[in-house]
Image: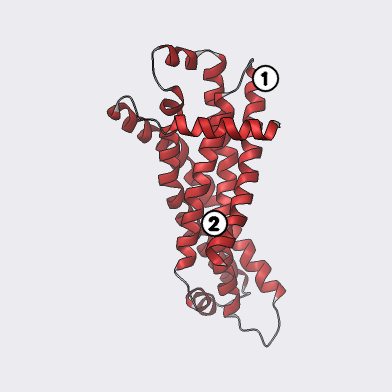
Amino acid sequence: MNFLFHMGRYALFVRRVFGKPVNHRIFFNQIAQEMEALGISSVGIVVIISFFMGAVITLQTAYNIEMPFIPKYTVGLAARDSILLEFSSTIVSLILAGKVGSHIASEIGTMRVTEQIDALDVMGINSAGFLVLPKVVALVVLNPFLVMISMGVGIFGGWIAGTSTGVVPSADYIYGIQYGFIPFYVIYSLIKAVVFAFLITTISGYWGYYASGGSLEVGRSSTKAVVVSSVQILLFNLLLTQLLLA
């Protein structure tokens, strides 16, 4: 019953979030600020993790297919498909669920326990839309770009690791990246990025918006936001894979 309660309240919360903004100029200014706070500030961690992720995928693939009848370009092919299909979209979104999700939940939760949200409601402002909708729009717009950056950096990291250690020649790795390329794989990852961004922002906003008590409860809400967002990302990753690639 607790699950059904939160599902129903979450659905009503999302409907409130997508209410009409009170002032469009303020709304667009909020989107620009949230892009900086949620998206652009995450570029560094995305680049670092993607580089080492691509390097590890390449080395593990090369060390596990050391057979004379398997061509060397298979390393580049396997690294490319692993990065495009799964790691850049899902792993980056899981990282953002921890970084961005906890930030959103703690920020809105603090506003709730300090009665700032109550003040917005008293003034007749749709507090859910005012606080959460700019975050949703900002991350939905920027997350696909973060995923594309992750793809490029991950493949580059694999090339650096493969060529510097000598496990795969540069020409073979590049040929493997180009061999049998399916453009829909990129579109598939970008679709997942948009869905995951929506889940992260709305779920984190939900747990922060309905926080109660004091600072301890805000911390618990942040933890719930990260856990629930991560689980939903994995669930929807399974559903979208079945729908788009089956």
Seen at 63% across and 50% down, the residue is: 235
Q: Residues within 10 Å of mark 2 (few under 14, many from 20)?
A: many
Q: Which residue is mark 1?
A: 216
- State the image coordinates of residue 180 (x, y, percent, origin top left): 50, 78
Disc 2 marks which amino acid?
Answer: Ser
Seen at 44% across and 27% down, the residue is: 131
Point out which mark residue 88 bears: 2
Tell me where residue 103 sits by quadrant. top right
Q: Under tag 1, what secondary structure? A: helix
Seen at 41% across and 39% down, the residue is: 138
- Residue with the most extreme bottom position: 69
Seen at 48% across and 17% down, the residue is: 117
For the N terminus, which image quadrant?
top right
Query: Height in image: 244 above or below 5?
Result: below
Tell me where residue 20 sits by quadrant. top left
Is residue 113 toward the left or the right of residue 21 in the image?
A: right
Q: Under tag 2, what secondary structure? A: helix
